[in-house]
Structures are given as C-alpha cells and as structure tokens.
Image: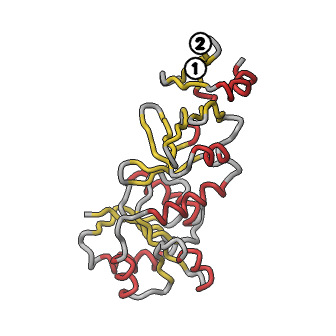
C-alpha cells in the first residue's frame, strides 16, 4: 500500500484524479487539499509516498510547497502550463499531467514512478537555494529518503570526500555538497570554517578550550571539533 495526497485547487481536478485512482487499489488516498498551505501541513503530517501536486494554487505554489516539505515523496505535477513552460519539468525528469489529460496519460505517469527522487531532489535543492540569500533548510539523504533539515539545527559540518556530513543533535545526515560548497552557501554570520574538514555553527558553541597553541571547540551537544592553526585568528575575533 502507498499513501497518496491530492493537492489541487480545482474540485474537478481532484475528482478526476480520484476517479483514475480507482484502477490502482495499492494507491490509497489519505488526504486532499485545495491550497498550498494545507498541502504543506498534510504532506508533513502523513508523509505520503505519492503526491499529485498542482502548480498554481492559493497560498503557496506547487514549487513553493516543495521547499517546506520535511520529506520528499514521489511527485506528479499537474499543470495548465503551455509546452514551453513544461520544458522546465522535463529537464528534471519530474513527470507532469498537462490539463486536460486522459486516463492513458495518467497511467503513464503512475507507471513511471520508481521511488528514485534524485531528479526531484535536484529541483528542490535549487528552489531552496533560490528562496533567500542563505537557505534556511538544506536537502539531505537519510536512509533511502530525501529530507530537509533546518540550517539552524545543524551543529557542525564535516567533510566526507566529495560530500559532507551534517551533524544535528545525535543524528548525522549526508549532503551532496562538498564542504567548500556548503561554506559558500551558509550564512557566514552563523557558520565558521575552523578546519579544512570542519565548519561549526557559532550558535551551538558551548566553550573554546586552549591546548598549548591549539584550540578545540566544544559544542552544546558535547561534540568536540578541532580548530586548525590556519583558522584560529578568525575564530578568536569572534569568540574571544
């Protein structure tokens, strides 16, 4: 069984999807909403496997909804956009239903679902970065799912080859960005590079300890991060 949510501001659109879903007993409708704000609430509440998501809705657009989700489900967009606008979806390989659509087109969209959210993740990641100068949430891998993590909840960032590990309380998440890329994207007023392999959240610092000519930073969750000599001056200016 897979949980499904329909988010469409047109009642006729929701009714049509429900009618077509009758051919798929494994897809169980758990909620339907008619605006973007309720879509965010219900998707975060139910954690569905699949969402039929309209793009032009009151409150929040379908694109904006993506940036507020705690966990990324499979998404099938529905839209009345013309063929030129649809090219934006095609490059991300996110399927869409162009209104009005047939039962055969609906079936094709459902049959294409495979649980691989890599392309949708790329789209969501770019949308998160576009929202503000410094994003408030970042997309990360957790088990086999893509979820978003609030930037303010990150204690420190650890280099992990071409990727990075984000430490949050007692959890660790994998980011597709390298540590230098994250350094460029995180607010420098809150995050500071203290080692070629480490970035700390200044709001999560408990104390700074000196050992000879070196320093360690103890964070509020008890973790200790080493400060390399090349980054000491920048840290001293802020913490001392």
- Considering every residue shown, the one lying at the far right of the view is 237
- 1 or 2: mark nearer the eye: 2
Residue annotated with mark 2: 211
Q: Where residue 202 appears, x then y in whole percent? A: 63, 29
The numbered disc on residue 192 is none
How packed is label 1: few (under 14 Cα within 10 Å), some, or many (20 or more)?
some
How packed is label 2: few (under 14 Cα within 10 Å), some, or many (20 or more)?
few
**Which residue appears at 43% of the width and 63% of the height?**
117
Image position of 147 with respect to 205: above or below: below
The foreground one among 198 and 35 is 198
Instruction: Say which element carries label 2.
Output: strand
**Which residue appears at 49% of the width and 42% of the height?**
160
Q: Distance between the residues labelled 1 and 2?
A: 8 Å
Q: Where residue 7 appears, x then y in whole percent? A: 47, 67
The foreground one among 119 and 74 is 119
> Does the CB distance between marks 1 and 2 fall below 8 Å?
yes
**Which residue appears at 45% of the width and 62% of the height?**
118
- Considering every residue shown, the one lying at the far top of the view is 212
Give left or right: position of 60 versus 28: right
Image position of 21 with respect to 82: above or below: above
The foreground one among 64 and 89 is 89
Quadrant for residue 156, please give it.
Answer: top right
Instruction: Say which element carries label 1.
Output: strand
Q: Where residue 123 appears, x then y in whole percent? A: 55, 64
* Quarter containing the C terminus: top right
* Quarter containing the N terminus: bottom left
Give left or right: position of 56 versus 112: right
Residue annotated with mark 1: 216
**Which residue appears at 67% of the width and 34% of the height?**
190
Q: Earlier in the sequence, mark 1 or mark 2?
A: 2
Image position of 119 with respect to 164: above or below: below
């Amino acid at each position: 069984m897979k949980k499904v949510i329909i988010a469409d501001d047109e009642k006729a659109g929701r009714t049509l999807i429900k009618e077509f879903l009758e051919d798929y007993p494994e897809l169980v409708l758990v909620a339907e909403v008619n605006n973007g704000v309720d879509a965010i609430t219900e998707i975060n509440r139910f954690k569905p496997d699949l969402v039929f998501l309209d793009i032009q809705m009151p409150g929040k657009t379908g694109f904006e909804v993506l940036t507020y989700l705690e966990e990324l489900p499979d998404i099938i967009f529905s839209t009345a956009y013309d063929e030129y606008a649809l090219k934006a979806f095609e490059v991300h390989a996110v399927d869409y239903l162009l209104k009005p659509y047939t039962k055969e087109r609906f079936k094709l969209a459902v049959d294409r679902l495979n649980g691989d959210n890599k392309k949708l993740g790329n789209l969501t990641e770019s949308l998160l970065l576009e929202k503000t100068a410094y994003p408030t949430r970042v997309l990360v891998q957790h088990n086999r799912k893509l979820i978003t993590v609030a930037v303010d909840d990150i204690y420190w960032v650890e280099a992990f080859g071409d990727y990075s590990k984000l430490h949050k309380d007692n959890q660790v998440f994998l980011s597709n960005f390298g540590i230098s890329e994250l350094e460029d994207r995180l607010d420098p007023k809150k995050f500071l590079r203290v080692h070629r392999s480490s970035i700390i959240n200044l709001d999560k610092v408990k104390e700074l300890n000196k050992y000879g000519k070196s320093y360690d930073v103890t964070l509020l969750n008890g973790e200790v991060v080493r400060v390399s000599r090349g980054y000491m001056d920048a840290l001293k200016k802020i913490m001392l």
